Image (cartoon, rainbow, N blue to C red):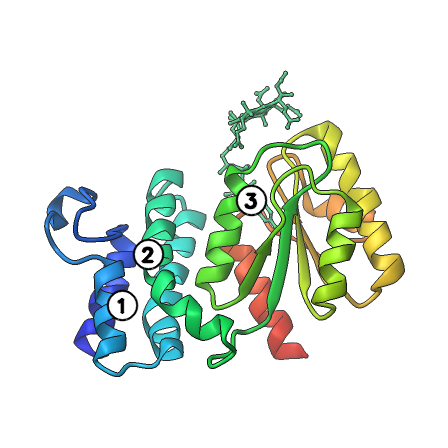
Amino acid sequence: MNDILNQISLCVEAGKINKSSPYPPGMKDQDGADELSKKALQQGFKPDEILEKALIPAMANVGNKFSRKEIYVPQMLMSAKAMSGAMIHLKPFFQSGETRRKGTFIIGTVTGDLHDIGKNLVSMMVEGGGWEVIDLGVDVSSEKFLNALKEKPDAAVGLSALLTTTMENMKMIVSEIKSKHKDTKILVGGAPVTHDYCKKIGADFYSPDPQGAVNFLNRMRLSI
Ligand code: B1M
């Protein structure tokens, strides 16, 4: 792989956001994903090339290491931040439509639930996997999901819940979405959610971690 793309990958895996970022200590005063992505664009690399050859593989490695419990939430957050540092420079090309993404993923923490740390990780990993992400935030009602689907009818939807009480709201949201958009794929996750619960409420997929969500979306895209 080209040297600069390789360096961007290494920065994302290591969680090196930009030159002034003190983390990780071993990369102090070195360019981070932010500066290197800007340089790569200046050198003529296309935004989708930077995304597909540097950011996506790096985030996939991070996600797999997290799934295998080789790294933990803080390291994954730093990698996601480094990826966002690179995305600042790439996003204008995606938003203008000049460069296409894999599809759209609408995500939110369900009604009554304010926990967003896990949801944010999923959101960042899916974006790092090459998808446009519409993050509706926390305490998201079925009405808000449906409004977002009006704008993006082909999107997949992700629901997160951290409380055994709000998990019940997933059921209602899944049923309302499916009654109006029967083909919309719905992923569910969050600490109390299980594969059996996913089946019971009629959602399409359960993942215990962000990388599982990315893998499901990528498989879904290939099967369309
Ligand atoms: Co709350 N809280 N909390 N809390 N909180 C828990 C969840 C709890 C287990 C603590 C406990 O009692 N031991 C408990 C729930 C008990 C239960 O329901 N059985 C609890 C409670 C009771 C409450 C309140 C009711 C407390 C109160 O006020 N009496 C209250 C509820 C507020 C509300 O939501 N309405 C409350 C409030 C809060 C804070 C606001 C203080 C804060 C949230 C801050 C924030 O999110 N911005 C908070 C926190 C931080 C926690 C704990 C400590 C940590 C949760 C977390 O962020 N984990 C938690 C106890 C614990 O887990 N140790 C607790 C890290 C995060 C990375 O993991 O979210 O599971 P997680 O996400 C994972 C996976 O689940 C998965 O990917 C992530 C990475 O692997 N994943 C998905 C998540 N969503 C996914 C979606 C997918 C796929 C995968 O596809 C769409």
Dot 2 and dot 1 residues touching (CB under 8 Å): yes
- Is residue 70 visible from the viewing direction of this image? no
Q: Nearer the viewer, residue 192 or 87?
A: 87
* Residue lying at 47% horizontally and 56% vertically, measured from the top left: 125
Q: Which residue is mark 1?
A: 37
Q: CA distance from mark 2 to mark 1?
A: 8 Å
Q: Position of residue 158 (x, y in %)?
A: 65, 53
Query: Disc number at residue 85?
Result: 2
Q: Nearer the viewer, residue 119 or 94?
A: 94
Residue plotted at (47% across, 79% down): 99
Q: Which one is earlier in the sequence, the residue at label 3 or at label 1?
A: 1
Please give left or right for residue 143 compared with residue 8 in the image.
right
Where is residue 82, by image quadrant? bottom left
When the figure is inspected, residue 197 is found, relative to residue 60, above or below; the finding is above
Task: Examine the rendered structure and indicate whether residue 46 appears above or below residue 4.
Answer: below
Q: Are marks 3 and 1 in contact (CB under 8 Å)?
A: no
Q: Are marks 3 and 2 in contact (CB under 8 Å)?
A: no
* Quadrant of image for the N terminus: bottom left
- Give the residue at mark 3: 119
Please give the name of the residue rendered at 70% of the width and 42% of the height, measured from the top-left corner.
140
Disc 3 residue: CB within 8 Å of ligand 1: yes
Secondary structure of residue under mark 2: helix
Q: Earlier in the sequence, mark 3 or mark 2?
A: 2
Mark 1: is the Cβ under 8 angstroms from ligand 1?
A: no
Find residue 90 and report its horizontal and vertical position in percent: 38, 69
What's the residue type where badge 1 is placed?
Ser
Under tag 1, what secondary structure?
Answer: helix
Q: Quadrant of residue 4?
A: bottom left
